[in-house]
Image (cartoon, helix red, strand yellow):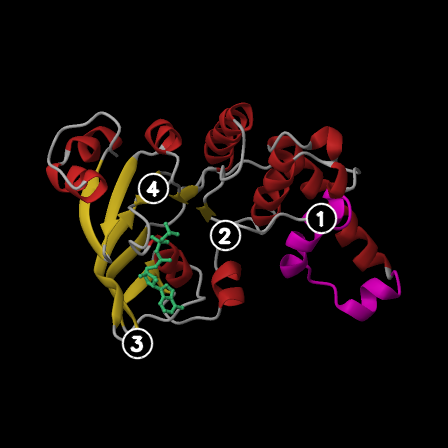
Amino acid sequence: MTDRTTPPPELAVRDVTVRFAGLTALDAVSFTVAPGSVHAVIGPNGAGKSTCFNVLSGLCRPASGTVRLGGTDLTRLAPHRIARLGVARTFQNIVTTEGTVADNLMLGRHALTRAGFAASALHLPRAVREQRAHRERAREIAELCGLGDLFDTPVAVLSYGDRKRVEFARALCLEPRVLLLDEPVAGMNGAERVRTAEVVRDVRERLGLSVVLVEHDMGLVMRLADEVTVLDFGRAIAHGTPEEVRRDPEVLRAYLGTDDTGEDAA
Ligand SMILES: Nc1ncnc2c1ncn2[C@@H]1O[C@H](COP(=O)(O)OP(=O)(O)OP(=O)(O)O)[C@@H](O)[C@H]1O
């Protein structure tokens, strides 16, 4: 397994504003994802979390503000260019149903393939060597995600949790420096949630990535995140460690409509 030793660049979101018609979905939002950290973005429904992810991955262009990965300005680049620059994402509701695990992971390798389509189709030696190397790497990533034994299995017969992990492994196949996880445990049962949290932690440590996580499961956020940004009505109302934000009066107000220090809030 090729593990990374150099830390990923910092991801800096500065004063990002997004408007939809009359509605300000993000209002001058800023936060920094420290190299190699897990950074959660949380907030009540409609707070702007998905919009924030869409800006980071290039699906939504902000009216103002910037997103930088180290020295590179990602703001307003197309999604495929952002992915090539090292920011890969998973989608909340996409669960693959076609092909084998290997087929799906090889799709993730596609963006990194150098040999042209014609060379691959003609089975030229360089293209064959390259395909073999990509397949080996895809197998390593499958193993890291607990899918090693399922590499040649059709995804249609996998459990929901395993299929969500195929989506996660596919994003890793782009060799990202920053991985954006959009509700990685949504729809999973308790055991699958615990397993996924272990995989995310392992992957972060072994591959030395930064992870940005949008998640409603506060147990997962509390266990996994180094730092949390809380959005409410498009504004970043708090930043800090999970312990800090769960005690923040403004966060409690946003979640509960009260400043009572309830245990179940953030
Ligand atoms: N394409 C769009 N057009 C118009 N309004 C939008 C669009 N996308 C999002 N919004 C609005 O922007 C606000 C933020 O939405 P967003 O989906 O980012 O919130 P969220 O925090 O991800 O919510 P949830 O937790 O329910 O997924 C909401 O008021 C939403 O209705």
Left or right, residue 178 beside residue 23: right
Q: Is residue 57 above or below residue 151?
A: below
| Range of residues picked out in magenta | 97-123
Mark 1–mark 3 contact, CB under 8 Å?
Answer: no
Mark 2 and mark 3: span between their CA atoms?
26 Å
Report the residue marked by disc 3.
21
Mark 1 and mark 3: span between their CA atoms?
36 Å
Q: Which image quarter has ligand 1?
A: bottom left
Q: Residues within 10 Å of mark 3 (few under 14, many from 20)?
A: few
The residue closer to the viewer here, 256 or 225, is: 256
Specify the label residue 89 is tagged with: 2
Report the residue marked by disc 1.
97
Q: To which quarter of the image does residue 172 belong?
A: top right
Under circle 2, the secondary element is strand
Amino acid under disc 2: Arg
* Disc 3 within 8 angstroms of ligand 1 (CB): yes
Q: Look at discs 4 and 3 and give the one toward the viewer.
A: 3
- Relative image position of residue 142 (x, y in whole percent): 66, 36
| Chief SS of the magenta region | helix
